[in-house]
Image (spheres, rainbow, N blue to C red):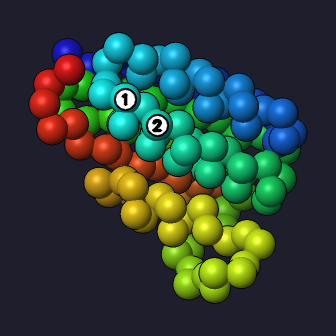
Amino acid sequence: MVRLLPKITLPTAASSVAEARHRVRDFLAGAAPAQVLDDANLMTSELASNAVLHDGGWYSVGATVSSERVRVEVDDNTARLPILRRVTPDAVNGRGMTILDALATRWGADPTPTGKRVWFEIDLDEPS
């Protein structure tokens, strides 16, 4: 069975990042192990922060969970796709996609008619 967190649209304000993170965490609570919750929480925060940083006016967050995986999607209305960069240890920012690459089982970014969708998936080792 697949559970769905319908997409919620949020303004590109710094305060909305916490809302995105809490919605995803509340949705996944009880459906995924604690480490998956922590990782999904961090990656959701990174994607929401990127949407706010590149301020297209709005972004939306949605998620699905099944016995096999968790998937979180963040849509925004900026067409520029994210890139995985090498960052130096003393860099102030630019680590978001590196974090995503390290923690997600897989991730990607796809153009949409209104901008882009950045998503990540975390495979669940055991059905929850």
The residue that mark 2 highlights is 38
Q: Amino acid at mark 1?
A: Ala
Pointer 1 local density, CA inside 10 Å: few below 14, some 14–19, many at least 20: few
Q: State how far apart marks 1 and 2 are (Cα).
A: 6 Å
- Of residues 53 and 94, the one nearer the viewer is 94
Q: Quadrant of the C terminus?
A: top left
- Of residues 120 and 114, the one nearer the viewer is 120
Left/right placement of residue 12 relative to residue 114 reads right
Q: Amino acid at mark 2?
A: Asp
Image coordinates for residue 33, horizontal then vertical, percent: 30, 28
Residue at far left of view:
126
Residue depicted at 31% across the width and 18% down the height:
31
Name the element at disc 1: helix
Pointer 2 local density, CA inside 10 Å: few below 14, some 14–19, many at least 20: few
Contact, mark 1 vs mark 2 (Cβ under 8 Å) = yes
Residue depicted at 46% across the width and 37% down the height:
38
Left/right placement of residue 66 relative to residue 17 reads left
Residue depicted at 52% across the width and 75% down the height:
84
The residue that mark 1 highlights is 34
Name the element at disc 2: helix
Q: Quadrant of the N terminus?
A: top left
Specify the quadrant of the image occupied by residue 71.
Answer: top left
